Amino acid sequence: MNVPRIHDARFIASATDVSQLPAPMFAEVAFAGRSNVGKSSLINSLLGRKKLVRTSSTPGCTRGLNLFRVEFSDGVLDLVDLPGYGYAKRSKAERLSWGPMIENFLTCRQGLRCIVVILDIRRGLLDDDLQLLEFLDHVGHDVLLVATKLDKLPRNKQKPSLAALGRATGRRVLGYSSDTGYGRDHLLSAVLQRAALRPSVDPRVGPEGASTRTPSEGGS
Ligand SMILES: Nc1nc2c(ncn2[C@@H]2O[C@H](COP(=O)(O)OP(=O)(O)OP(=O)(O)O)[C@@H](O)[C@H]2O)c(=O)[nH]1
Ligand SMILES: [Mg+2]
């Protein structure tokens, strides 16, 4: 698969409110999901960078709206790493402020072309994931649903788990592993296509080709 070269990827800004972010300049794609699901790791892996985005084995690592700018050979894309939801051990003040922070961002930010919603393949779809997906549908956002940490499942469980998630969500689910890079080119192509940065491969074909499709996988 021919994905464009990345010339530069850099941190631009961090904010606790959408109003504090620099005005949108380029197409933007945001990454959302539960705490510790692997959002920041996925961005690093997608961009082929080891330490651009801070990650941690402790939930609650990303604490604001973090904007990164990526220069490809034929365009610029901004990525926004969002704090995770569903982490009960956060302070009450943080839990109360983060919901609106994420919600305001997703509602108000101009230029958002697509939201990559990330699930942990081992945990599947939880209530707050479902709420986020419903909220994004309500706002009218284009969603790419990704199940990451695929490497944590035995190989023979990967496809059935992806298919089960496809059935549970009624959406196509892309498999991913930030550890092995599985699904990387495919997700990057899908993101770029959604961001309308350049025409790309058909995102309905799975990372292993058509064979990864299951009857349950509909369009997103
Ligand atoms: N094996 C494996 N581990 C992963 C993968 N993705 C992330 N991790 C690990 O999961 C932990 C959490 O990763 P982060 O990327 O910080 O997760 P996050 O969703 O950004 O977390 P918050 O910022 O706290 O919401 C880290 O220990 C990562 O090394 C993956 O695909 N495979
Ligand atoms: Mg993070």
Image (cartoon, rainbow, N blue to C red):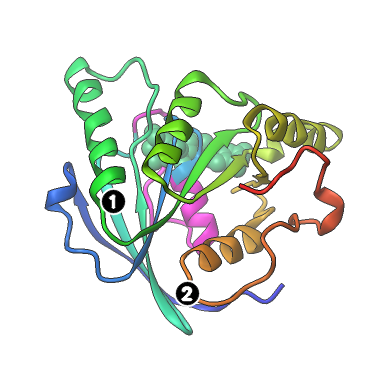
Q: Where is residue 11 in the image (x, y as percent from the top left)?
A: 29, 62
Instruction: Classify mark 1: helix, strand or loop.
Output: strand
Task: Give the amino acid at mark 2.
Answer: Leu
Q: Residue 197 carries which label?
A: 2
In the image shown, does 94 or 53 lie closer to the viewer?
A: 94
Residue in view at x 42 percent, y 48 percent = 141
Q: Position of residue 218 (x, y in %)?
A: 71, 44
In the image shown, does 74 or 11 lie closer to the viewer?
A: 74
Quick check: can you spot residue 159? yes
Residue under numbered circle 1: 66
Q: Where is residue 79 in the image (x, y as percent from the top left)?
A: 38, 59
In the image shown, does 186 or 54 lie closer to the viewer?
A: 186
Instruction: Classify mark 2: helix, strand or loop.
Output: loop
In the picture, which quadrant includes the N terminus? bottom right
Picture layout, residue 25 above or below residue 36: below
Residue in view at x 58 percent, y 76 percent = 199
Residue in view at x 40 percent, y 22 percent = 86
In screen coordinates, is 107 left or right of 2?
left
The question of residue 54 being in magenta is answered with yes
Task: Give the amino acid at mark 1.
Answer: Asn
In the image shown, does 99 or 56 lie closer to the viewer?
A: 99
* Neighbours of disc 2 within 10 Å: few (<14), some (14-19), many (20+): some
In screen coordinates, is 75 left or right of 5?
left
Q: Where is residue 14 in the image (x, y as percent from the top left)?
A: 21, 51
Which is the main secondary structure of the residues drawn in magenta? loop
Which of disc 2 and disc 1 is earlier in sequence? 1
* Span shown in magenta: 40-60
